[in-house]
Image (cartoon, helix red, strand yellow):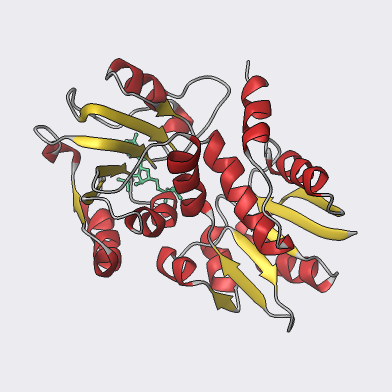
């Protein structure tokens, strides 16, 4: 049986083994997918051991995506730019390919599952960490009118905007500069959700018919999802759909078959308390 795993730290609450098992059943593929707690210190040894034992593919999650980017023998174009890798796959020659499926997963959830178009829209990303890096390339590929990264620490947002400047209309600002600006889509890529905190967002930030998307997900609505509802967002979504979509892209890279995601997203949604 072909072996796959997700490495992360912590990892015990990961939904990925369940999602990948559902994909395998749906597509008739024979594989095993486990969740393994791997600290940054253990990362390179554990990855080598996994592939050395014949493992076929890995997902890497927080806080290992940058290490996975460094580890890969080859990188896809979007992983190169993102400087973060969430999917490793063995190639025919034994080398390890690094890919990032987070951004395409987000775009597929927004545009495919929720019919939220990005073309010519004004996009705002909150936060300038690894989560932001992973999604910017695929968002810019949808030709938004503009994409602004806002961050507490200005320098980090400026650096990221500079790195992606060649592929679209991207700029950065700080939270004090948000009043009097409006956006069609606001994406929360800060780690603030995890502590139920909210970045300082002015009322009126969301344009009429605008939507909100939190990359984080939880059984209960996140603080940011709740904020979106108070701002009359058409959609105020959390990242469960993106989680399933990024997993589907990884499955496709490994197995060459694209699983259907709608039923699985519905199943996981129904299991929320
Ligand atoms: P990740 O890999 O999840 O993106 P990260 O690299 O630690 O994690 O980045 C976290 C991001 O969330 C940063 O942009 C951080 O802002 P700073 O760069 O200014 O530290 C942002 N962040 C975390 N808590 C926040 C809060 N309470 N309000 C606003 N931004 C917050």
Tell me if 231 is positioned left or right of 61 in this view. left
Tell me if 78 is positioned left or right of 68 in this view. left
Say if 92 sits above or below 111 in the image: below
Q: Quadrant of ligand 1?
A: top left
Question: What's the residue at 48%, 66% (across, down)?
Answer: 79
Residue at far right of view: 1
Look at the image and tell me in which quarter the C terminus lies.
top right
Count of marks, rendered view: 0
Tell me if 245 is positioned left or right of 161 in this view. right
Question: What's the residue at 19%, 30% (across, down)?
Answer: 205
Which x, y percent locates residue 252?
66, 58
Q: Nearer the viewer, residue 36 or 241?
A: 241
Which x, y percent locates residue 52?
81, 73
Which x, y percent locates residue 64?
57, 57
Q: Nearer the viewer, residue 159 or 98?
A: 98
Tell me if 34 is positioned left or right of 110 in this view. right
Say if 69 sits above or below 250 in the image: below
Q: Quadrant of residue 207?
A: top left
Which x, y percent locates residue 89?
68, 68
Residue at far bottom of view: 93
Say if 8 sits above or below 242 in the image: below
Question: What's the residue at 69%, 80% (across, down)?
Answer: 95
Question: What's the residue at 21%, 50% (across, down)?
Answer: 145
Q: Quadrant of residue 169?
A: bottom left
Look at the image and tell me in which quarter the N terminus lies.
bottom right
């Amino acid at each position: 049986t072909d072996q796959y795993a997700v490495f992360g730290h912590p990892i015990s609450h990961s939904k990925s083994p369940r999602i990948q098992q559902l994909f395998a059943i749906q597509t008739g593929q024979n594989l095993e997918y486990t969740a393994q707690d791997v600290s940054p210190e253990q990362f390179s040894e554990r990855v080598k051991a996994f592939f050395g034992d014949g493992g076929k593919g890995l997902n890497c999650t927080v806080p290992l995506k940058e290490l996975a980017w460094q580890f890969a023998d080859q990188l896809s174009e979007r992983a190169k730019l993102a400087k973060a890798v969430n999917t490793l796959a063995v190639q025919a020659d034994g080398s390890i390919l690094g890919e990032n499926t987070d951004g395409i997963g987000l775009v597929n959830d927004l545009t495919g599952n929720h019919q939220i178009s990005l073309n010519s829209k004004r996009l705002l990303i909150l936060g300038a960490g690894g989560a932001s890096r992973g999604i910017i390339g695929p968002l810019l590929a949808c030709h938004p009118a503009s994409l602004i990264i806002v961050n507490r620490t200005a320098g980090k947002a400026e650096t990221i905007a500079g790195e992606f400047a060649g592929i679209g209309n991207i700029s950065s600002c700080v939270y004090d500069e948000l009043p009097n600006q409006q956006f069609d889509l606001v994406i929360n890529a800060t780690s603030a959700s995890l502590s139920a905190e909210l970045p300082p967002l002015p009322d009126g930030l969301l344009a009429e018919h605008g939507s909100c998307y939190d990359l984080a997900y939880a059984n209960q609505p996140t603080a940011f999802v709740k904020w979106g509802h108070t701002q009359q967002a058409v959609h105020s979504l959390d990242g469960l759909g993106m989680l399933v979509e990024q997993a589907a892209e990884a499955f496709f890279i490994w197995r060459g078959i694209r699983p259907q995601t709608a039923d699985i997203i519905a199943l996981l949604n129904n299991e929320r308390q």
